[in-house]
Amino acid sequence: MYLGIDLGTSEVKALVINENNDVVATHSVPLSIQRPHPHWSEQSPQEWWEATDYLMSTLREKCGQHWQAIKAIGLSGQMHGAVLLDSSGEVIRPAILWNDTRSALECAELEEIAPELHQIAGNLAMPGFTAPKLLWVRRHEPENFKRTDTVLLPKDYLRFKMTGKKISDMSDASGTLWLDVEKRDWSDALLEKCGLSRRHMPALVEGCDLSAKLDPHIAEHWGLNASVIVAGGGGDNAVSAIGVGAVSPGDAFISLGTSGVLFVVTDAYRPAPQSAVHAFCHVLPNLWHQMSVMLSAASCLQWFCRLVGVTEVALLEEIAQLSAQEKANAPMFLPYLSGERTPHNDPDARGMFQGLTHSSQRALMGYAVLEGVSFGIADGLRVLQESGTRIDQCSLVGGGARSPFWAQLLADILNMPVVTHKGGETGGALGAARLACLAAGKPLNKVCEKPEIYQTWSADAQRHKTLMQRYAQFKALYVNDLNYRKH
């Protein structure tokens, strides 16, 4: 038995699998986000830990006598978040999250003082990454910066609470802008530019390797054996890749969670920062990956449903009844509710409806939201292809994978097959449990099989043609808005 814990932005999810990779039990606990100022996005690490502790007691009840058979735990987590600990291991301030955009000025500063950044870290300086957050803390909260003894990523804070060890992995560390991504080691030069050193960083392991053993007191509290090991784990998207068996160069998937990601496995380090494409380490040795990332994906649908007072299920049913003519004349939607990364690297980008009339009922506006997010994914595919990456088919994971309509829309827009898998919405937690298996010694070919395909969605040529006309309008709408903001 193996346990996977996925610390997301909107929830913590945990999942237990048996020796046959079958899911035995799963549960999740919602999380809250604090936005005390414009551009800010923060969470309490203590809330993460309390939610995780509650999950363990719930899964213990669900698993019954099988609970004590758990051999290893894997971790997956939202990337880039800055958890600052003092010398006593206490949290100094709320964690600054990946979708926090307050550090735009610090990004410009980092680009100026670290001309080697793009080659070493493989990425542009963006407000979502960890390094600019620490520059912001140094400038605006100098006392907190002075007190900082260790900077941990979100899932690594859970590991610290579980094991007492300060350890991270290469995939998650790739999102800090302090890692030499090709060498898979901390960059002393980039750390120094931020007033930090290796002393402030956790040790590094590969995501599939053993990182530490469960603290005996925590093991007793959770009703687990003290011999339980904790795998290195990884950033949420790299771990989701393990969940869908994306372990070979060219394997690709789309994740429709709070953010939207197009992920492709590579056999070498291939940075393409000029297009705001991310180049990170994979959770397996000698593999890397490229990603395009949009900051708001399924969260756009959640936002719209809250705004108009309808459930996602009911709205999707209404959208499915729209005619082709109605969809072809629907309003346009820019999905930049939290700014945007790929390809614009624009923290000031904002969401927008364009083309509303008295006949724009909520189903049409809901369709526009799904279409706008899908066009954002298409933007990512375009710049990945321009960087020389070829993708022939994509798996679909995350909460958005539950919608057949959205899967078909993506296939039509991207003009490629999109496949969904049984249990695809559990990608991060399942991948974390699989990393636990690998850390416990199970062979890769037995653990990382591609899950059974639930359905394949093929592109329709006529729909693709119509959607490309609307995609051109989508791109022009952003350019027009950008020009307006500049003037």
Image (cartoon, grey):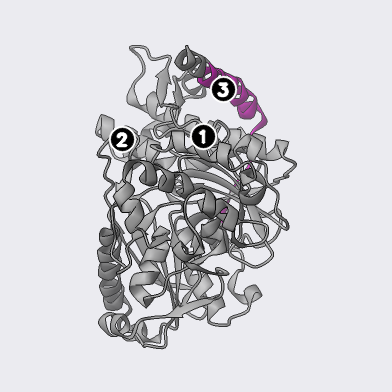
On the picture, is 477 further left or further right than 118?
left
- The secondary structure that most of the magenta stretch takes on is helix
What amino acid does circle 2 point to?
Cys
Q: Nearer the viewer, residue 474 or 415?
A: 474
**Part of the protein shown in magenta:** 454-479
Q: Are marks 1 and 3 in contact (CB under 8 Å)?
A: no
Q: Relative to residue 446, is residue 175 depicted above or below?
A: above
Q: Quadrant of residue 58?
A: bottom left
Can you say which quadrant of the picture contains the N terminus? bottom left
Disc marking residue 305: 2
Can residue 304 be seen by looking at this rendering? yes
Residue at 45 percent across and 62 percent down: it is 200
Label 1 and label 3: CA atoms lie apart by 25 Å
Q: Earlier in the sequence, mark 3 or mark 2?
A: 2
On the picture, is 205 further left or further right than 360?
right
Label 2 and label 1: CA atoms lie apart by 36 Å
Percent x, y for residue 400?
A: 45, 46
Write down the residue under mark 3.
475
